[in-house]
């Protein structure tokens, strides 16, 4: 076998955690090698070591049969190794083309070539836009395009599809198969097991920093992989108990008009949206049809050109975001890293940041009640299974999925009357995904209402009482639970007429 890159006996410790414990993996020429594991298992750390972002404590790396020391990404790039990062590495103040240039000083950037690649992969990004104005989906497309534009022989994809649409994912996976057939080699990380089964030749499973299984794709079924990742926990598919009664109205949105990032009308609603008390309502739609603007507008983060929003019987159309938090609206936003967390603050501070002026953690003298704060933080860490060495670890040191769990724990624990959840399980492993879905369902039934957007139609069907379909900025269909049907909802998402 023709090994192009190998990591041998790799050890890596961070304060309070052994991220990698004697890990060995090899990448063959022309193969896609998937690396699987729970949130915090060590996948990103391992790939960062191959890319020179992290130095191992022990172990060796061989590339094309030669021992190498990869001390920085520029060493990796020189060896022909490129990487798409889980948390994007783009520079927000530069425009798209300039972000291409920072990857390579030598290669001249040809806009037409980029456009051709965009077209072939159906991954559109506005080349003249500043990266800071792009949505998370667009930034992910850009990361992928940028990597494929350069001629790397060894490619690392760390969760490249977490904010891509199903169609974009499909095209990307096909492209990856094509480029390995041309002799390139790929390490591929994803929590979506169907993607892994579809695209990979070989699979290595990590658990708490150790390799627990490695073999060919056809040697393991999906259930086996889940078992290797999390042990023998069984995950049931059923969450909704079937009972559904619509009660009092909590939120009503009428004829909303909202502009998008580039001043087109992203939302242009003729139909209304209603969320009742104790309901969990889904918004289904293909990315880019106004769902992001809809959620932002409900939270008061975008200017409303026309239309009205009512909450608990009162009009809140022009209320500030702060006042909306005050009256009980909570938000799990799309872009969790730049709007959801303060990276340098600790896990505890990030969990409690929104409670800072509340009576819960301030004592009679107006001082922070340190003991109470620790108690709440520890409780949340336990409940949400946030893997962190301590409550004082800066959140930027957590794995991608565990960072997501911090935001989810915080927003849900504030107990808003209405919880807006945008792609709540993106980046979570199988176990955590099931936990969060159950949590949201329970939340709606016992505490407050939930309005959820998910790219994953199965997720909505599993959880929701009702589903609205958004298409080109308007609501084009509505389904009650007893009418849920993947085919019909999917058709409505494409703007096609449905017969009932
Ligand atoms: N820079 C760092 N400083 C301290 N600890 C770190 C650092 N980077 C990672 N860790 C820790 O190392 C462990 C492995 O993290 P890693 O990011 O590799 O997980 P992962 O498998 O990629 O998880 P996910 O699926 O959530 O992205 C985690 O416990 C994490 O908290
Ligand atoms: Mg990771």
Image (spheres, rainbow, N blue to C red):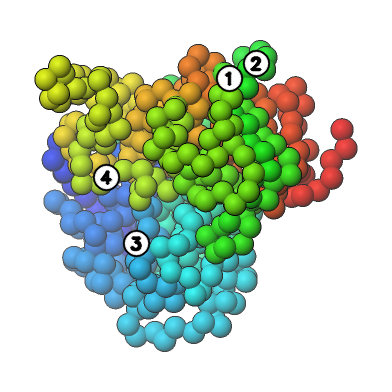
Mark 2 nearby-residue class (10 Å; few <14, some 14–19, many ≥20)? few
Labels 1 and 2: the sequence-earlier one: 2
Q: Residue at x 59, y 77 (%)?
A: 116
Distance from the alpha carbon under mark 1 to that under mark 2: 6 Å
- Judging depth in this view, the residue of 453 and 205 nearest the camera is 453
- The Cα atoms of the two marked residues, 3 and 1, are separated by 41 Å
Relative to residue 429, is residue 393 drawn left or right? left
Circle 4 SS class: loop
Mark 3 vs mark 4, CA separation in Å: 17 Å
Q: What secondary structure is marked by label 1?
A: loop
Q: Depth-wise, is mark 2 or mark 4 nearer the camera?
A: 2
Q: Which residue is mark 4?
A: 342
The earlier-in-sequence mark between 3 and 4 is 3
* Residue in view at x 77 percent, y 26 percent: 483
Residue under pointer 1: 277
**Mark with earlier residue (3, 2):** 3
At 39% from the left and 84% from the top, the residue drawn is 107
Q: Is residue 256 left or right of residue 373?
A: right
Q: Classify the position of the N terminus by image quarter.
A: bottom left
Instruction: Give the residue at mark 3.
Output: 89
User: For numbered disc 3, what is the local secondary structure?
Assistant: loop
Name the disc covering residue 247, or none. Answer: 2
Q: Identify which residue is drawn at 44% across, 83% down.
A: 109
Assess whether mark 2 and mark 3 are in contact (beta carbons under 8 angstroms): no
What is the C-alpha distance between the residues marked 3 and 2?
46 Å
Tag 2 secondary structure: loop
Q: Nearer the viewer, mark 3 or mark 2?
A: 2
């Amino acid at each position: 076998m023709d090994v192009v890159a190998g990591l041998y006996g790799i050890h890596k410790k961070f304060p309070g955690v052994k991220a990698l414990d004697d890990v060995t993996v090899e990448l063959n020429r022309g193969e896609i090698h998937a690396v699987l594991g729970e949130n915090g298992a060590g996948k990103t750390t391992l790939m960062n070591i191959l890319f020179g972002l992290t130095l191992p404590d022990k172990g060796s790396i061989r590339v094309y049969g030669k021992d190498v020391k990869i001390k920085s990404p520029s060493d990796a790039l020189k060896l022909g190794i490129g990487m798409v990062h889980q948390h994007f590495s783009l520079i927000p103040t530069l425009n798209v083309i300039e972000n291409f240039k920072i990857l390579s000083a030598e290669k001249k950037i040809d806009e037409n070539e980029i456009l051709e690649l965009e077209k072939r992969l159906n991954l559109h990004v506005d080349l003249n836009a500043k990266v800071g104005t792009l949505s998370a989906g667009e930034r992910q497309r850009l990361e992928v395009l940028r990597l494929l534009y350069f001629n790397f022989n060894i490619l690392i994809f760390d969760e490249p599809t977490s904010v891509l649409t199903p169609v974009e994912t499909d095209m990307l996976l096909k492209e990856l198969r094509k480029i390995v057939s041309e002799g390139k080699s790929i390490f591929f990380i994803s929590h979506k097991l169907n993607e892994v089964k579809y695209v990979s030749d070989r699979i290595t499973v990590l658990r708490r920093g150790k390799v627990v299984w490695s073999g060919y794709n056809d040697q393991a079924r999906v259930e086996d992989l889940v078992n290797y990742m999390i042990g023998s926990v069984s995950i049931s598919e059923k969450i909704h108990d079937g009972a559904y009664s619509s009660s009092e109205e909590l939120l009503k949105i009428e004829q909303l008009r909202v502009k998008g990032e580039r001043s087109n009308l992203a939302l242009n609603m003729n139909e209304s949206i209603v969320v009742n008390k104790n309901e969990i309502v889904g918004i289904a739609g293909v990315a880019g049809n106004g769902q992001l603007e809809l959620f932002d507008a409900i939270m008061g983060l975008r200017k409303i050109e026309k239309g009205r929003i009512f909450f608990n019987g009162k009009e809140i159309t022009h209320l500030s975001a702060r006042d909306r938090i005050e009256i009980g609206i909570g938000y799990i936003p799309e872009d969790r890293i730049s709007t959801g967390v303060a990276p340098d603050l600790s896990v505890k501070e990030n969990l409690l940041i929104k409670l800072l002026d509340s009576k819960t953690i301030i004592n009679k003298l107006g001082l922070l009640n340190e003991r109470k704060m620790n108690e709440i933080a520890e409780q949340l860490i336990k409940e949400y299974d946030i893997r962190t060495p301590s409550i004082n670890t800066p959140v930027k040191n957590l794995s991608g999925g565990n960072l997501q769990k911090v935001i989810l724990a915080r927003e849900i624990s504030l107990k808003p009357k209405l919880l807006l959840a945008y792609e709540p399980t993106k980046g979570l492993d199988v176990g955590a995904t099931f936990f969060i879905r159950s949590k949201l369902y329970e939340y709606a039934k016992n505490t407050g209402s939930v309005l959820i957007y998910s790219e994953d139609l199965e997720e909505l069907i599993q959880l929701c009482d009702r589903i609205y379909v958004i298409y080109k900025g308007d609501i084009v269909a509505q389904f009650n639970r007893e009418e849920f049907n993947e085919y019909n909802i999917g058709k409505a998402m494409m703007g096609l007429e449905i017969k009932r």
